[in-house]
């Protein structure tokens, strides 16, 4: 290989920094290294994060299935107690968003994610011992606090290892596991209610135990297994060349700064108008999403199915959602577009709610429930990728993701209060509120996409053709406090 086609770069591949690794900077050999590296990450990092989020979503949503299995009677819930208990989860989830993002800069991702998993697994399992409304509220509140350590951190972790145009598909694989959780949750609840009912242990209690204990075990394993950064990839996992390429890719992927706490980046995130657009879109998502995951078993039951059969009938809507999550996010990465895909997905959810509102026929209602899931779930990875794509600087990106989740989860409490028992079986109020917020998503996604396209066109006219920011340009943008306003930076629209 000629010297023109290679560059000798220092790599932190051991305890000391004396190792020098010869890494080609272009050409077929470089491409082969990148392919091997991405394949290894795709087989280890992405599936493992997806497994973590599957248990995250499973433990969060199993209360809906537990309700059909006798939770309300077993804990003596009255009136709106069940809805209020749901809201307390989101209170805890909301207040811990931004603190967790700063903790992520202080400790390794494996420690933050692993420890919070253990703690929320304990909370989830403890719900089996709940005997009253106050017991249920306490466990849900603290479970919300601890669950916030995984979901918001995952897009940040993925952004350490993947480039901007590679994120949505991987984020979809991660968040797509929540749709698997919906399907598995229904199957597990069906199996428990039908086959494992016991006089001394009610089905709803057994459900919390069966789904909570594996979370604790997985949390312990995560502390030792989850990769933290390209610099800490193990020798058994990657070659020195692959590790060096991973480090270079990370630095070129808007990860050039290592500051623990940069107040300028914090303020820049808080003042960034794009974040307010994305927060409104995420509010529009979380209100129907929170209501859907918690109340789908009840909604299906009100369609005429028995409680046990209703558990099973919650599976197909999530199965439909799995397909759309992967298809939409794959298309989004290929086209490098986020806004139009968010708007199109929200329109699918709109169709679902219109079917639910306009018809009292079982087939139309069940089809509507499927359309809602197919429209809502792809928006989660799309939005998190969109925010991660368009923020330069670790702190600014982390705070922006935390803002997104904070606003979204704060308003998710609305979604837990709109399906009142007295409005069954048509739930006009709940469906109407959700339809209104899906329309908000469409409008703001298209508006933000338009604004970003116009800004990119302005920069093209003033500064020429776009290019990826170099490590030096990223550091310059951060040091000068201009971040994604750098002339060479172009937004994903």
Image (spheres, rainbow, N blue to C red):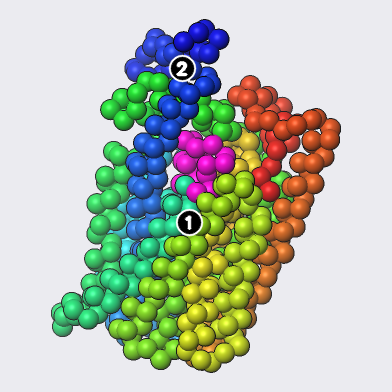
Let me know if residue 331 is in the magenta part. no
- The answer for how far apart the CA atoms under marks 1 and 2 are is 33 Å
For the point 35% across and 47% down, the residue is 48
Question: Which image quarter: residue 34?
Answer: top left
* Span of residues in magenta: 151-169
Q: Earlier in the sequence, mark 1 or mark 2?
A: 2
In this picture, is 422 found above or below 232?
below
Residue 443: where, in percent of width, then height?
Answer: 72, 64
Residue 149: where, in percent of width, then height?
Answer: 43, 50
- Compared across the picture, whether 235 is left or right of 369 comes to left
- Compared across the picture, whether 423 is left or right of 297 comes to right
The residue at which mark 2 appears reads as: 23
Q: Main secondary structure of the magenta part?
A: helix
- Compared across the picture, whether 370 is left or right of 13 comes to right
Task: Pick the residue in front: 224 or 446.
Answer: 446
The residue at which mark 1 appears reads as: 326
Label 1 sits on a secondary structure element that is: helix
In this picture, is 277 found above or below 2?
below
Let me know if residue 163 is in the magenta part. yes
- Compared across the picture, whether 465 is left or right of 167 comes to right
For the point 62% across and 74% down, the residue is 350
């Amino acid at each position: 290989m000629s010297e023109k086609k290679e560059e000798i770069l220092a790599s932190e591949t051991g305890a000391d920094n004396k190792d020098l690794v010869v890494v080609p900077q272009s050409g077929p050999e470089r491409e082969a290294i990148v392919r091997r590296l991405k394949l290894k990450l795709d087989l280890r990092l992405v599936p493992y994060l997806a497994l973590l989020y599957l248990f995250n979503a499973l433990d969060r949503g199993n209360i809906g299935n537990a309700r059909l299995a006798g939770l309300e009677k077993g804990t003596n819930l009255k009136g709106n107690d069940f809805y209020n208990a749901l809201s307390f989860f989101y209170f805890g989830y909301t207040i811990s968003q931004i603190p967790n993002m700063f903790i992520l800069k202080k400790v390794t991702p494996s420690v933050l994610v692993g420890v919070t998993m253990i703690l929320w697994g304990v909370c989830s399992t403890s719900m089996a011992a709940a005997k009253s409304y106050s017991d249920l509220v306490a466990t849900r509140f603290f479970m919300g606090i601890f669950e916030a350590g995984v979901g918001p951190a995952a897009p940040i972790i993925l952004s350490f290892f993947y480039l901007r145009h590679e994120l949505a598909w991987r984020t979809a694989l991660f968040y797509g596991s929540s749709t698997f959780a919906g399907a598995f949750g229904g199957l597990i609840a069906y199996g428990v209610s039908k086959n494992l009912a016991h006089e001394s242990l009610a089905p709803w209690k057994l459900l919390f135990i069966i789904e909570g204990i594996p979370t604790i075990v997985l949390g312990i394993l995560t502390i030792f297994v989850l990769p933290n950064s390209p610099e800490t990839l193990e020798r058994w996992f990657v070659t020195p060349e692959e590790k060096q390429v991973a480090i270079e890719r990370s630095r070129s992927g808007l990860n050039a700064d290592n500051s623990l706490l940069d107040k300028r980046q914090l303020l820049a995130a808080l003042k960034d108008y794009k974040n307010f657009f994305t927060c409104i879109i995420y509010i529009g998502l979380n209100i129907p999403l929170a209501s859907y995951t918690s109340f789908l078993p009840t909604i299906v039951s009100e369609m005429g199915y028995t409680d046990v059969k209703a558990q099973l009938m919650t599976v197909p809507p999530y199965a439909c959602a799995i397909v759309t999550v992967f298809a939409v996010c794959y298309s989004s990465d290929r086209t490098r577009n986020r806004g139009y895909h968010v708007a199109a997905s929200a329109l699918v959810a709109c169709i679902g709610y219109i079917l639910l509102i306009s018809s009292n026929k079982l087939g139309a209602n069940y089809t509507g429930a499927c359309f809602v899931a197919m429209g809502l779930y792809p928006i989660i990875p799309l939005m998190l990728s969109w925010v991660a794509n368009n923020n330069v600087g670790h702190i600014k990106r982390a705070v922006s993701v935390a803002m997104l989740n904070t606003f979204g989860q704060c308003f998710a409490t609305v979604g837990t209060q709109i399906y009142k028992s007295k409005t069954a079986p048509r739930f006009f109020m709940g469906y109407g509120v959700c339809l209104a917020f899906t329309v908000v998503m469409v409008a703001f996604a298209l508006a933000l996409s338009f604004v970003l396209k116009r800004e990119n066109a302005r920069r093209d006219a003033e500064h020429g053709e776009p290019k990826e920011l170099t490590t030096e340009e990223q550091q310059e943008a951060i040091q000068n406090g201009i971040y994604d306003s750098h002339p060479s930076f172009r937004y994903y629209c």
